[in-house]
Amino acid sequence: MRDAKQPEHPKRPIRSYVLRQGRLTAAQSKALERLWPVYGIPPGAECLDFRHLFGRHAPVIAEIGFGNGEALAAMAREAPDTDFVGIEVHQPGIGHLLRMLDAESLRNVRVANVDAVEFLRERVPDASLSAVRIWFPDPWPKKRHHKRRLIQPDFIRLLGQKLVPGAIVHLATDWLPYAEHMLAVLQADDGFENLSATGTYCARPAWRPQTRFERRGARLGHETRDLLFRRCTAGPSTQHEPGP
Ligand SMILES: C[S@@+](CC[C@H](N)C(=O)[O-])C[C@H]1O[C@@H](n2cnc3c(N)ncnc32)[C@H](O)[C@@H]1O
């Protein structure tokens, strides 16, 4: 029976994406069928045990909204001693990533095909992630759509809960008004400290792979901004740029 306190038509959550249908190629579709059992995180309600999921104990880094997965595959290749969780709602991109992982026999990646907000809230243990990377999230440029932007105060608080102290949130965007919004949201959260020497943006770390959306932005003449914030431990610590 419905809880009397619940509204009859509960408000639908505001999503940071619109699902585009029906653009799976035959190869992506085959890859999803064959490789999802290897790399996919089955849907469920229980909190994950990363040690069990990857079969070893290693730092875990999440990439949210990995698109076609090029950057995620590159990171997994470059850091075999780190485990990566990719979260993406767009199935063709997942199919594309699975094919790359399989072609290179990369085994340090698992993929969730679900809204990252729900996944973090329900499936990721507190203080379990060594870094979160969100590169070129949808900018939602129109003012009436700003509420759909993924980077919001509540979301940053949720990230703070899931990161180990000292872990890094790394954002990048080619949309200046979104970069300014990201900066304001992160600066306002006292659980994070900015790693930028200027108190604004960081130089793009040499190790950050270029993404498909970044290339698209560059073709349009957009400039990219990287934001690196560290999850505070007890108090602000010495600033330095982290490695890969
Ligand atoms: C603009 S694209 C960027 C993709 C990739 N990072 C790149 O730079 O090429 C943003 C991606 O984020 C995904 N996305 C948006 N909101 C999401 C959410 N709440 N959970 C998971 N994925 C999301 C979209 O499906 C899309 O693939």
Image (cartoon, grey):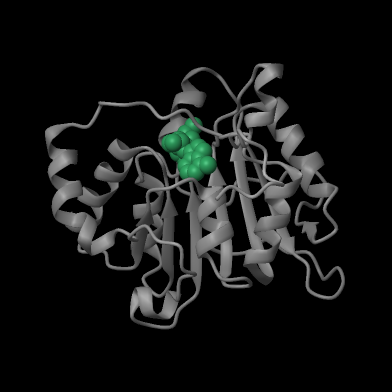
Q: Is residue 21 above or below residue 194?
A: above
Residue 159 location (% of width, % of height) = 65, 57
The answer to whether 175 appears left or right of 210 in the picture is right
The residue sitting at 67% across, 44% down in the picture is 6
| Quarter location, residue 109 | bottom left
Residue closer to the observer: 23 or 209: 23
Count of labels in the image = 0
Q: Which residue corresponds to the image point at 43% horizontal and 47% vertical from the top-left?
A: 114
Residue under the image location 34 percent in, 54 percent down: 73
Q: Quadrant of residue 184?
A: top right
Tell me which corner region of the image, top left, top right, bottom left or bottom right, holds residue 94: top left
Give coordinates of residue 167: x percent, y percent: 65, 67
Q: Is residue 97 above or below residue 213?
A: below
Q: Please indicate whether residue 208 sits to the left or right of residue 78 in the image.
A: right
Q: Is residue 214 visible?
A: no
Specify the farthest residue to the bottom.
57
Relative to 95, say whether 228 is above or below: below
The reply to whether residue 153 is in sight is yes
Residue 82 % position (x, y): 43, 71
Up the image or down, 84 lies above or below 215; here it is below
Residue 95 point in image, percent of width and height? 25, 43
Q: Residue at x 35, y 45 (%)?
A: 70
